[in-house]
Amino acid sequence: MTDWNLPSVGIFVVRPPGQHLARKVRVLTELMLEHFSETGRPK
């Protein structure tokens, strides 16, 4: 089945409200944006 592709799906990050995030949460969010964005750069 070489002519079949997986459908596109959305990825959502759910994080606690507020401006002060733990660094590991902020870094993970930025890494996901870079990895999964269509342009290869964070938006």
Image (tube, rainbow, N blue to C red):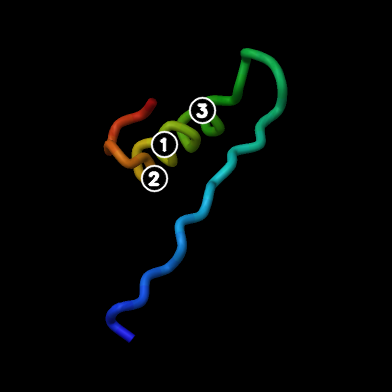
Q: Which residue is mark 2?
A: 36
Percent position of residue 41, x then y: 30, 31
**Residue furthest toward the top?**
19
Crowding at dot 2, Cα within 10 Å, few <14 / some 14-19 / many 20+, comes out as few
Q: Residues within 10 Å of mark 1 (few under 14, many from 20)?
A: some
Residue type (three-letter) at the residue carrying disc 1: Leu
Image coordinates of residue 9 in percent, x first then y, are 51, 54
Q: Relative to residue 21, is residue 23 drawn left or right?
A: left
Residue at image mark 3: 26
What is the three-letter code of the residue carrying label 3? Arg
Q: Find residue 16 and name its label.
A: none
Disc 2 residue type (three-letter): Phe
Name the one closer to the observer, 27 or 3: 3
Question: Is mark 2 in CB contact (under 8 Å) with mark 1?
Answer: yes
For the residue labelled by badge 1, is the local secondary structure a helix, a strand or a loop?
Answer: helix
> Measured along the vertical axis of the image, is residue 30 above or below residue 12?
above
Mark 1 = which residue? 33
Q: CA distance from mark 3 to mark 2?
A: 15 Å
Indicate the quadrant where residue 19 lies. top right
